[in-house]
Image (cartoon, rainbow, N blue to C red):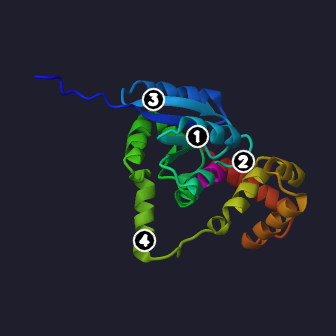
Amino acid sequence: MGNTSVTTRPSSVLLVDDHPIVRRGMREIIARELDLTVCGEAGTVEEALRLIEETKPDLVIVDLSLDDVSGLELIKQVAAKGGSTKMLVASMHDETTYADRALQAGALGYINKAEATDHLIGAIRKVLNGKVYLSEEMTARVLDRTRVGGNGGESPIESLTDRELEVFSMFGQGYTAKEIAERLSRSVKTIETHRDNIRAKLDIDTSAELIHRATLWYNENRT
């Protein structure tokens, strides 16, 4: 009788995070699993897109705060290509604010970095199987919202578009409108328009109050 064993290729994972120490930690966790392998690392959207094209990973783990553009933009660009690569967000940002946006952009899961040590492998395998991964708390929140219908409990922050939220977050990190424009490759006028829209949606009267609110929000939601 012949040997009927079959060798299965490990699923390849690309790590996209602008902190090398975070990538190293995730790589070490993944390296313990025989059915998973890290095929590359990137710190920017530009690097990630190049590596995705070169390595054709089964899964991309994406942080939302990258050196050049928001991770949400990377997710949208990868999803728009229509390939088989799946995406999982691993971020320090508050799940209740960003998980819905990540799923709408094209990701299949969202894990907070504080939980990554214990739950990363489970999240990876669930997403690789085409299923959505969220924390128990976020799953319950989504189900509750579905039962009541619509977005009845939507906060003003949730009314911001992805780009407006990105600009709001960057104001909270201390960037000026000019610096934000440079990082996002947009005109200062465009950023000022986003700023005005944010003020209107959040009922903020002055730019100084916007900076104050953005700083408080960013510090509260970054862990």
Identified by mark 3, the residue type is Thr
**What is the x, y in percent for residue 141?**
45, 62
Magenta range: 72-76
Mark sitting earlier along the chain (4/1): 1
Spatial separation of the CA atoms under disc 2 and disc 4: 31 Å
Up the image or down, 26 lies above or below 136; here it is above
Between residues 68 and 207, which one lies in front from this camera angle? 68
Q: Residue at x 80, y 61 (%)?
A: 210
Identified by mark 1, the residue type is Ile
Between residues 143 and 69, which one lies in front from this camera angle? 69
Identified by mark 2, the residue type is Val
The mark found on residue 69 in the picture is: 2
Between residues 114 and 103, which one lies in front from this camera angle? 103
Spatial separation of the CA atoms under disc 1 and disc 3: 15 Å
| Residue 75 painted magenta | yes
Say whether residue 26 is visible: no
Query: Which SS class for mark 3?
Result: strand
Callout in the foreground (4, 1): 1
Q: Which residue is mark 3?
A: 37
Identified by mark 4, the residue type is Thr
The mark found on residue 146 in the picture is: 4
Q: Are marks 1 and 2 in contact (CB under 8 Å)?
A: no
Mark sitting earlier along the chain (1/2): 1
Quadrant of the image occupied by residue 191:
bottom right
Name the quarter where the C terminus is drawn. top right
Q: Residue at x 74, y 43 (%)?
A: 68
Q: Are marks 4 and 1 in contact (CB under 8 Å)?
A: no
**What is the x, y in percent for residue 105?**
57, 58
| Residue 187 painted magenta | no
